[in-house]
Amino acid sequence: MLEAKLEQAALLKRIVDSIRDIVQDCNFECSESGLSLQAMDNSHIALVSLLLGKDGFTDYRCDRSISLGVNVGALTKILKCGGNDDVLTLRAEDKPSVLSVMFEDSIQDRISEYNLKLMDVDQEHMGIPDTEYSASVTMPTAEFQRIARDLHTLSDSVEIDVNKEGITFSCDGDIGAGSIVLKPSSNIDRPEQSINVEIVEPVTLSFNLKYLNHFCKASGLSNQVTLRLSGEAPLLVEYKLPNGFIRFFLAPKIGDDEEA
Amino acid sequence: MIIASDDEDELDNSTSSSPKTFKSSSKSSRKNSPKRIAKVEPPVPSLQLSTSTSKRPSEDIINSKDIEDSSTLSEDISDQIPEGYRDSDSEPDVSVSEIAEIAKLPHELANKCPFGPTWKKGQPIPYSSLTNVFETIEGTTKRLEIISYCADFFLSVLRGNPQALTKVTYLFINRLGPDYEGIELGLGESIILKAIAESTGRTLAQLKLSYKEEGDLGTVAQISRSTQSTMFKPQALSVDNVFNDLKAIATSTGSASQTKKANIIQRMLTSCQGNEAKFLIRSLEGKLRIGLAEKTVLIALSQAFVSWESENSGKKFPSVSIVKGEELIRDAFCQVPNYGVIIDTMIKYGIFGLPDHCTVSTGVPLKPMLAKPTHAISEILDRFQGEEFTCEYKYDGERAQIHMLENGEIHVYSRNTENMSQKYPDIVEAVKVFNKPDTKSFIIDCEAVAWDQETKKILPFQVLSTRKRKDVETGNIKIRVCVFGFDILYFNGRSLLRSSLKERREVLKSAFQEVEGIFSFAKYVDSSFLEDIQVFLDKSVEDSCEGLMVKMLNGVESGYEPSKRSRNWLKLKKDYIEGGVGDSIDLVVLGAYHGKGKRTSVYGGYLLGCYNPETEEYETACKVGTGFSDADLESLYAKLHPTEIDRPRSYFVYNSASNTQPDVWFDPTMVWEVKTADLSISPIYTAAASFVGKNGKGVSLRFPRFIRIRDDKDVTDSTSSEQIAEFYSSQVNI
């Protein structure tokens, strides 16, 4: 039996919005400690890992671990039926065939309840490697989103270069090239505007911009985003949640295509 | 524990063609830092390192003995080893070191004994084992070898997982189900290219370039070096998931189905290793091109079943029984063209139980009997000397097999056993009219012919072919059809396949009644005099028929032989005698299509057109791809390649919307003589459109064939639009 209450439906709405371009079907794992999810896109290029600890919920109860196989598109449709400020409650039996989603609008005394049919999602669990990253950059989410969006108008891939000076995003496309340099800075009045660069050794890697733009859908969830890079390991893009995180991993592009 | 970490490098090398994975890329990072990418302890409590392979015994051994290097290594092994070798239950003597040995040489192993690995009962069959067989078959042109490869593979499927044989068979013949179910992939090149682009990170332009070089999308997919690394290595494909995914692609409809299809393809491609991508793409394109005929598959099936049964029963079958089995399967397939049913029957009742358990039944279309062409009446007399035979009109329509089930359901099937009930709801309704009350169930063979209700005359095939194909409503049908019945194969629960034609004709007449404009019996004459046949032939042409069908009337040989092009049925067509359109036509070469497969690096087909002196424009008339020798193709390429132009000349008149636009256009320099079966109205081609005057539709050549280059003619001397229009209107029947 699962019963999880969120003070604001907006949180789950934003989370689901941010993953729906990447993942079609996935399993939400509910355990005593909270709600988690791990899924890859069709091409196995990107991986989403979500953790929403039980303290992030107003009420959370889960006696036995259950997996909720969900079609993300369908879940989005149902979540659209609720307002951002509604209180949201998720319910499921121990061996559920449906997930019940309830919205309570305290102002208008309106209660709506929807049942989402669950499905068997065949999914392997991936042990996410505990990489020691060579570089870690924290910046405002809006900044990151803007960079990804602007560069995507020029090219499909971006080269990210981190060194002591800062972080450089650059791309080279058919119509021209572009690059953005961010230097470390700290803003005491508004700490969320700070840019923080930690570095063990310089890293340069290329990534698919389409995916980075998908990740940026999570911008509404947090003020700051952290990028971690290392060798040829996947890029980690992390958004902190009130009591958990949403992490996106993106495998780098490799080699130069000589025909390019 | 014998596996040393050195082995690991070799393991990785052997997969160097495959996309870099998270795992392998992590190796380089390990050089820098001691961290391992796939640690046994998961970083997050709820995220366990347990790929589905972890339950396998071999891995358990490794895990328990060598925690240090285990996870990366064992995963590598499980990617490499053919399924069968992983079962320590079935092969207890295979030590871990042997596993490693085998794992190192998956390809050599495959070449030595492509079908060696058996997989444990009930285990899914790895798709790679199938593609390895394909690869081997592609490498030879010897039919006997191909048969034995297929048979060996089928046998190992039977031993390990007989239920999967149907799917395996369908993958071998590259179909998704019996023809009459009509499940087709129908994927365009562009969607496949898009999926390859997505999963390899290459751009469409690069892919198209290498497609032009290779001429085969499958090879392109295989060699497309991935510029995009992936996260975890996906699970290996199994025959089961490939087949189901293909079916899912074929059956997905509605909005966003294109995206859905692309997603499935992308997912499958990502999981592909080695030659899997090549054959997967070819399967998606609907052509395996490995020189594997369906007939060969049938023979191989027979061999596999005979050996399997002799293994199971301990009996030795004489080698003759393979030939016998082959016949039985072929017979059964003619009567029930559904591999699923046949294979299940064979598994259940054995191959020799087929005749008793696999017979004609309503609702399952059987392959129609076909006729051999003849060119003169004298040939017919030679063939049927001293025999009783009959001549029937050969109606120019669409072959149709009408089934009525016991429960009153009516189905109409095409020549290719596709369900046409949707296309001919009027026939479905007509059955009630011409059916006699005592007729409860039947299968009749007939020809559906376009019918002019006012003049009560047969209309030519071209008229019939303009009928809508889908969502036809009886109320809106503009082109009526009349059904001409000529044979009955099944009547009130009884198969008539082995009855003589004379008997079948009696049954047919007793079961149905003629209704003008709806149902008629095919006209016939039983005569063995040359003059009579000649008169009848002329009459048939006058009556808008194609010619005559001449059939054995009595005796064993007059039975209905499904799907056989039998010498007991001969067809005598008017154009066989006259040789098509009397004059050949001289057309200008306007464009060409890039060759594929065998014709890679030369043009595979050409776009021809005629010259219209009035407007001084060239109008397209047909695409031609037959009649060329290999030498022709090369010399034509050499001659025409320099005349390629970037875009069509402003004085080319062509259908810009249609996808028949050629890959390259030429400056008009060359005139070819082509022959054609006849001319028809076409929405795609523009020739003589101004003369024929059918809403801008032009005339095109049906079945054009290249004869020779007309060096003596200048491009403006080619057959003119006006002449084409004359040819068209001078054809009989129009």
Image: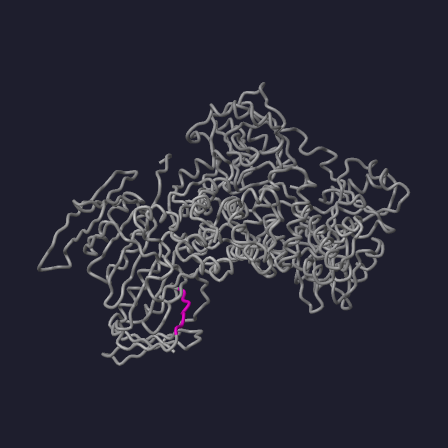
Residue closest to the far front: B1
Q: Give left or right: position of B190 versus B109.
A: left
Residue A70: in magenta span: yes
Residue closest to the far left: A189
Q: What is the quadrant of the N terminus of chain A in the image? A: bottom left
Does residue B548 appear in this view? Answer: yes
Q: Give left or right: position of B413 versus B665.
A: right
**Based on the displayed image, in which of its 4 quarters is residue B92 positioned?**
bottom right
Q: Position of residue B461 (x, y in %)?
A: 65, 46
Q: Position of residue B412 (x, y in %)?
A: 66, 58
Give the residues drawn in magenta, as a range.
A65-71
Q: Position of residue B618 (x, y in %)?
A: 50, 30
Q: Is residue B173 above or below residue A82?
A: above
Residue A8 vs residue A202, the one in the foreground? A202
Residue closest to the far bottom: A109
Q: Main secondary structure of the magenta part?
A: strand
Q: Is residue A203 above or below residue B335?
A: above
**Based on the displayed image, in which of its 4 quarters is residue B209 positioned?**
top left
Q: What is the quadrant of the C terminus of chain A in the image? A: top left
Q: Position of residue A189 (x, y in %)?
A: 8, 60
Residue B282: in magenta span: no
Residue B34 vs residue A159, the one in the foreground? B34
- State the residue at coordinates (59%, 32%): B724
Does residue B452 appear in this view? Answer: no
